[in-house]
Amino acid sequence: MNCPICSSKQNKRKYKIEKFVVIECPKCGLIRLDHDFSFDKVKKLYKKQYFNNPVFSIGYIDYAATERSLRLNFLKRAKRISRSVGEKQIRLLDVGTSTGYFISECSKLNIIAEGIELSEEAVDFARSRLKLTVFKSALEDFRGKKQYDVISAWDVIEHSSDPNKFLKKVNSLLVENGKFFFTTGDVQSVCSKLSGKRWHLFNLPDHLFFYSKGTITKLLKKNKFVVKSITYPWNYYELGYLIERFLKKVVGLKNVKLIKFLAYNFISRNIIIPFNLFDIMEVEAIKK
C-alpha cells in the first residue's frame, strides 16, 4: 500500500521483529508494519480472547486485572475533556471502548457517553455488568446517525489498517468544531529510540502504524483536523502490568504461565504507581 500520509510508493526497512518487518516512508517519515491486512483481516484479530489471551500472542494476558488503574486514568481523561469542552452536557462516543470502563467514568461527570467495540466478549461485559450503551461494531462499519461533541479513542488509531478512512469517519460523526481526543505511542520518543526493536509498543501484528508528533499532525491535517495539543501525561499502572511488559519486551520471556506467576501475584497486582516513559502522546484535535 502507498503511504497514507504522502502517497509515496517507496519505503525502507527499519526493523525485522520476529517474522514481521517494520518499514519507514523516506518522504514523510511514517513508520508502519509491512502488511497486507485487509480491514476484514484486522477485525478478526479482536476475537473473544483479545482481552484475556492465554497465549499472549496479541492483546492482553488479563485486561480486567488492570481495572483499577484504568479507571484512575480514564477519570483523569474525562475530567480533562469536561474542562476543555466546557459545556453543561457533552455527548461523547468512545471508539474501541473495550469493557466500558472509560464511559463508566464519564457518567460521573457532565458527559453522556456511548461506546463502540469489536470484541463480543467485551461488549457483553459492558452491557450486562455495567449497564452501558455499547455498540458491537468497528468504527468504519458504524451506522449511527447522531453526531457527537467529542469522540475519544484510547490506544486505538495504531490498530487501524486505513487511518485515513478511520479519521474521515471520526470527522463525519463530530459536530462542527467537535473534538477528537486520543492516545497513541510516539515512535520518535527517546524511549523508542533507545529501545530500538524492543520498544514496548511494537506489539505486532495488532499495532499497524507507529506515529510521531510530526506524522500524526500531518495525518490529522490531511483529514480536516487541527491539533490543539499533544502532551505526555503521567498514568497509573498496576505494578504487575509493568512487570509483565518488562518480561515480555525487554527480557523476551515467552512462557505465559511464568509471566503471570511473576507479574500478577497478590502483591504486584495490588500496587498501583504513577509511571511515565514519555512515549505515549495524548492528542486533542478539533474538526475543521
Image (cartoon, helix red, strand yellow):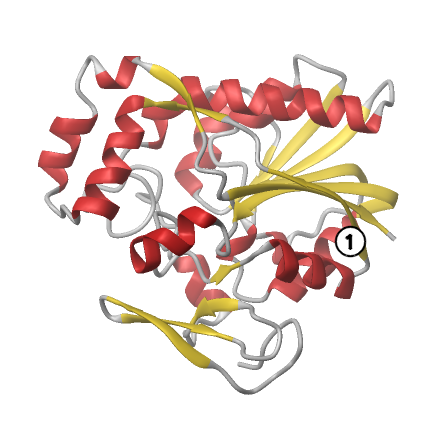
Residue 215: x and y in percent read 63, 62
Nearer-the-camera pick, 13 or 121: 13
Nearer-the-camera pick, 110 or 135: 110
The extreme bottom residue here reads 9
Q: Is residue 276 left or right of residue 62?
A: right
Q: Is residue 104 left or right of residue 145?
A: left
| Position above or below: 10 against 198 | below
Read off the residue under disc 1.
171
Query: Residue, x 49% and y 39% (percent of image)?
Result: 278
Nearer-the-camera pick, 1 or 46: 1
Residue 110: x and y in percent read 76, 17
Quadrant in which residue 45 is drawn: bottom left
Count of numbered badges drawn on the protein? 1
Residue 256: x and y in percent read 14, 41
* Mark 1: amino acid: Asn
| Position above or below: 123 against 165 | above
Q: Is residue 45 left or right of residue 253?
A: right
Query: Residue, x 32% and y 24% (percent of image)?
Result: 65
Residue 72: x and y in percent read 51, 18
| Position above or below: 83 against 9 | above
Please tell me whether mark 1 sits on a helix, a strand or a loop: helix
Query: Residue, x 65% and y 52% (percent of image)?
Result: 142
Quadrant in which residue 245 is drawn: top left
Quadrant in which residue 232 is drawn: top right
| Position above or below: 170 against 98 | below
How many residues crowd mark 1 within 10 Å: few (<14), some (14–19), many (20+)?
A: many
Query: Residue, x 54% and y 36% (percent of image)?
Result: 97
